Image (cartoon, grey):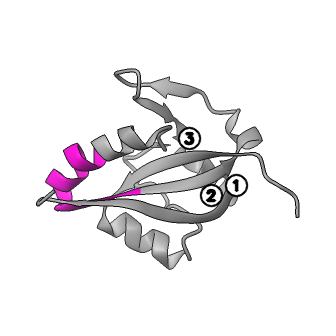
Amino acid sequence: MEQHNTITLYRPVNQVELDLIEQSGWKKFPPRLPEQPIFYPVMNEAYAIQITREWNVPAYGIGYVTAFEVEKDYLQQFKIENVGAEMHHELWVPAEELATFNSKIIGPIQVIQTYTEND
């Protein structure tokens, strides 16, 4: 079997997003809303946890950190954006590219952390 050259990315999601990911068979992220022109997976787990705990949990009461593998060659077209401290690295994927991005995910999208208001 051919071995894929992949990068692990992370994405904090709320319950609605997680339900849509599950409905896709754990294969794709849902389309962006009209006011969301960019899909931005993050480059490290610590940053995804920070977003989940500081934004998703206060806003939704629960948040999930997902991890997934994407073909490295495909990702090279997207610039890594730093939006704060050294660990705050994101890929900015235009919303209209999300279907193609989803097709480059290797294996399932996995929930690796769950946080609630009690954590």
Residue lying furthest left: 118
SS state under label 1: loop
Residue lying at 29% horizontally and 41% vertically, measured from the top left: 50
Q: Which residues are magenta?
A: 51-65
Say whether residue 93 is left or right of residue 86: right
Q: First in sequence, mark 2 or 3: give its number.
A: 3
Between the C-alphas of marks 1 and 2, the distance is: 5 Å
Disc 2 crowd, CA 10 A, few/some/many (<14, 14-19, 20+): some
Q: Nearer the viewer, residue 39 or 47?
A: 47
Residue neighbourhood size for the residue with mark 1, other residues' Cα within 10 Å, grouped as few (<14), some (14–19), many (≥20): some
Name the spot of residue 105 as percent of width and height, x first.
65, 57
- Pointer 2: what residue? 102
Above or below, 13 against 45 in this view is below
- Identify the residue under disc 1: 104
- Secondary structure of the residue carrying tag 3 is strand
Q: Is residue 78 above or below residue 30?
A: above
User: In the rendered image, which quarter is residue 32 located in?
Assistant: bottom left
Residue that mark 3 sits on: 93
Task: Please tell me whether mark 2 sits on a helix, a strand or a loop.
Answer: helix
**Magenta residue check for 102:** no
